[in-house]
Image (cartoon, rainbow, N blue to C red):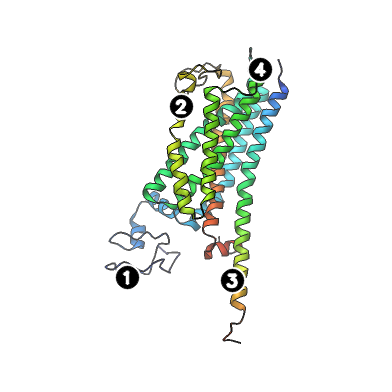
């Protein structure tokens, strides 16, 4: 195996056999040298360790983010076409129910992304993995975007159906609090100069904020709500007709793929900002080695 | 019951927010790379400048 890096990132620990091959992310903790460890570990574990290297992650994100965006866009295009032109109008709500195809996937994403952000933040807090800090903080703007879509499209849907743009209904209010939590995480991360301390503080807020997710989910059950109850079930029978379901699943898959692209692109931007003084960033900025 | 305008407005919001979600990180990456390029240029200029002892 030919190592791509020769210069050791730190002096070898006493007692370790001298070795010319060094692993750039600082993976040198065991009784064997890093190159030996790299050669003996499983490909998946090796890839996971490699992903922790900022230059490797930059290449990975730059390569796969456009594909995720493209696949997400294509999938959502199929979903939107089905939602607007193939599915029949609802017998009660007419065409206004077509808003469901963007409202529901966005609402699911708004909660799923928050859960993922808290998951990354927990890993970052416990194991101090820098990439997880970056990924956690990259979740926030995308999650906030999906929450904003949920609130705005819900409001637009509510006007013809409920006769009002907004109501302090439990589901709407808790979703608004979720948006404030996202904004709080983003604001806290931006307010502290030291990136690692900022990510830890904002990550803690994300972890605490997870308590809101079941409240949003069950708000229509726990309280009397203007918002309708659960219509679509992953497991069990949905109260929506099967002929109306296909575009919804296209949109669900599309928004997930789109989010992957957004997460990689945002994480790449943050990674570049954090590594601003490093040689590999300078080379990349001048069109050098990728 | 058409509600066409409401449907158009909702899908327009969806498209605009996703467009922002696409453009914002691209602009951030571009800004980060431009800052790195300027930093590298400044560093190269500082290395090329003769020091007091060399003069």
Spatial CA span between label 1 and label 2: 56 Å
How crowded pointer 2 is (Cα within 10 Å; few <14, some 14-19, many 20+) is rated as some
Q: Are marks 1 and 2 on the same chain?
A: yes
| Chain hosting mark 1 | A
Q: Which residue is mark 4?
A: A163
How crowded pointer 1 is (Cα within 10 Å; few <14, some 14-19, many 20+) is rated as few
First in sequence: mark 1 or mark 2?
A: 1
Mark 4 or 3: the one toward you: 4
Q: Which residue is mark 3?
A: B43
| Chain hosting mark 2 | A
User: Mark 1 and 4 residues: CB-CB less than 8 Å, in contact?
Assistant: no
| Chain hosting mark 4 | A
Q: Which residue is mark 2?
A: A215
SS for callout 3: helix
| Chain hosting mark 3 | B
Residue sitting at 70 percent across and 15 percent down? B1
How crowded pointer 4 is (Cα within 10 Å; few <14, some 14-19, many 20+) is rated as few
Mark 1 or 4: the one toward you: 4
Mark 1 or 3: the one toward you: 3
Residue sitting at 52 percent across and 41 percent down? A184
Front-most of residues A21 and B20 = B20
SS for callout 2: helix
Mark 3 or 2: the one toward you: 2
Percent of width and height locating residue A183: 55, 40
Spatial CA span between label 3 and label 2: 53 Å
SS for callout 1: loop
Q: Which residue is mark 1?
A: A18
SS for callout 4: loop
The quarter of the image holding the N terminus of chain A is: bottom left
Q: Is residue A133 left or right of residue B14?
A: left
């Amino acid at each position: 195996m030919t190592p791509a890096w020769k210069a050791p990132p730190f002096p070898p620990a006493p007692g370790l056999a001298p070795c010319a091959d060094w692993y750039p992310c600082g993976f040198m903790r065991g009784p064997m040298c890093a190159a030996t460890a790299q050669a003996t570990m499983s490909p998946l574990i090796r890839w996971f360790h490699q992903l922790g290297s900022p230059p490797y992650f930059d290449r990975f994100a730059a390569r796969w983010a456009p594909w995720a965006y493209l696949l997400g866009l294509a999938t959502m295009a199929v979903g939107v076409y089905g939602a607007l032109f193939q599915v029949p109008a609802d017998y009660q709500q007419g065409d206004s129910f077509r808003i469901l195809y963007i409202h529901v996937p966005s609402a699911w994403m708004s909660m799923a992304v928050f859960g993922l952000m808290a998951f990354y933040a927990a890993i970052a807090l416990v194991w101090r993995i820098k990439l997880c800090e970056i990924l956690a903080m990259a979740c926030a703007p995308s999650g906030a975007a999906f929450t904003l879509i949920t609130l705005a499209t819900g409001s637009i849907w509510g006007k013809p159906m409920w006769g009002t743009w907004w109501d302090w209904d439990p589901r709407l209010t808790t979703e608004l609090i979720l948006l404030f939590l996202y904004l709080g995480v983003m604001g806290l991360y931006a307010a502290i100069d030291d990136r690692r301390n900022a990510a830890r503080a904002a990550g803690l807020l994300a972890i605490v904020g997870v308590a809101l997710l079941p409240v949003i989910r069950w708000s229509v059950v726990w309280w009397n709500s203007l918002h309708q109850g659960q219509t679509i079930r992953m497991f069990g029978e949905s109260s929506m007709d099967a002929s109306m379901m296909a575009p919804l699943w296209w949109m669900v898959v599309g928004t997930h793929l789109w989010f992957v692209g957004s997460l990689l692109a945002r994480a790449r931007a943050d990674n570049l900002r954090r590594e601003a003084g490093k040689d590999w960033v300078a080379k990349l900025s001048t069109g050098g080695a990728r | 019951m058409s509600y066409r305008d409401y449907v158009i407005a909702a899908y327009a919001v969806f498209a605009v927010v996703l467009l922002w979600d696409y453009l914002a990180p691209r602009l951030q990456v571009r800004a980060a790379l431009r800052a790195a390029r300027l930093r590298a240029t400044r560093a190269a200029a500082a290395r090329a400048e003769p020091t007091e002892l060399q003069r």
